[in-house]
């Protein structure tokens, strides 16, 4: 991959990640605290564990891309993460900080091959992995919300609980 292509992909995916972060934040924040142990099946993660996986993986992927190295870190929750609001705050702070680091990775570095547990692609490609991973798990979590008695937020243009509304025209 040429550096100019890798730089284009970095910028393209950073913009997409920024846009997706708002929807992910809304889905995580919609988890009712009193029902965060909900799981649709005994083999499924709880809503709280799934939300933590989304938030921690988001920061891990971005930090790994910024470091240009993937290593298996623990998905263990820090002791201070006890509520849904704690996860939202972690996602906001750690994710934003890590995304800023990715913006500073040069196109030449983004074009370099990175080993992701045996897969070898240019570093820029892993930004797409992050997006796909996050959207997949956010979709799982959004399917938990209504059975928990929560409202499903607008993700891509309205839901039964947050119908699509046209923006008011400016005079």
Image (cartoon, rainbow, N blue to C red):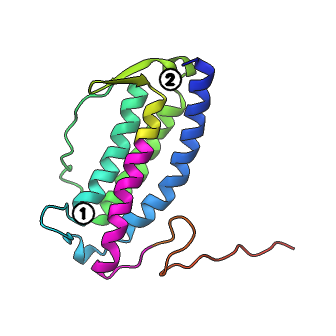
Q: Mark 2 points at which residue?
A: 110
Q: Is the magenta stretch mostly helix, strand or loop?
A: helix
| Labels 1 & 2 near each other (Cβ < 8 A) | no
Name the foreground residue: 121 vs 7: 121
Residue 170, x across and y down, in percent: 82, 72
The image shows residue 43, relative to residue 97, as above or below, that is below
For disc 1, the neighbor class at 10 Å (few under 14, some 14 to 19, many from 20) is many
Image quadrant holding the N terminus, namely top right
Residue at screen point 19% across, 40% down: 74
| Left or right: where 119 falls relative to 121 | left
| Left or right: where 164 falls relative to 116 | right
Name the element at disc 2: helix
Name the element at disc 1: helix
Residue at screen point 57% across, 69% down: 157
> What is the magenta range?
130-152
Residue at screen point 30% across, 75% down: 32
On residue 107, the disc is none
Q: Is residue 66 magenta?
A: no
C-alpha separation, residue under disc 1 versus residue under disc 2: 33 Å
Residue at screen point 55% across, 73% down: 158
The image shows residue 158, relative to residue 81, as above or below, that is below
Image quadrant holding the C terminus, namely bottom right
Report the mark closest to the observer, 1 or 2: 2
On residue 48, the disc is 1
Image quadrant assignment for residue 27: bottom left
Residue 58, x across and y down, in percent: 37, 45
Residue 66, x across and y down, in percent: 43, 29
Which residue extends farthest right?
A: 171
Name the foreground residue: 97 vs 157: 157
Q: Does the magenta stretch include residue 150?
A: yes
Labels 1 and 2: the sequence-earlier one: 1
| Left or right: where 24 falls relative to 33 | right
């Amino acid at each position: 991959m040429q550096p100019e292509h890798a730089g284009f992909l970095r910028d393209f995916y950073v913009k997409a990640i920024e846009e997706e972060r708002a929807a992910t934040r809304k889905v995580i924040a919609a988890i009712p605290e009193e029902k965060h142990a909900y799981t649709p099946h005994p083999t499924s993660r709880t809503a709280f564990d799934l939300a933590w996986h989304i938030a921690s993986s988001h920061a891990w992927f971005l930090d790994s891309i910024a470091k240009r190295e993937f290593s298996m870190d623990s998905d263990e929750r820090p002791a201070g993460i006890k509520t849904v609001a704690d996860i939202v705050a972690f996602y906001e702070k750690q994710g934003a900080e890590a995304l800023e680091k990715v913006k500073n990775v040069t196109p030449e570095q983004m074009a370099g091959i990175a080993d992701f547990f045996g897969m070898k692609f240019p570093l820029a490609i892993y930004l797409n992995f992050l997006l796909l991973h996050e959207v997949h798990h956010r979709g799982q979590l959004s399917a938990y919300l209504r059975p928990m008695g929560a409202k499903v937020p607008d993700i891509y243009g309205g839901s039964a609980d947050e119908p699509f509304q046209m923006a008011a025209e400016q005079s």
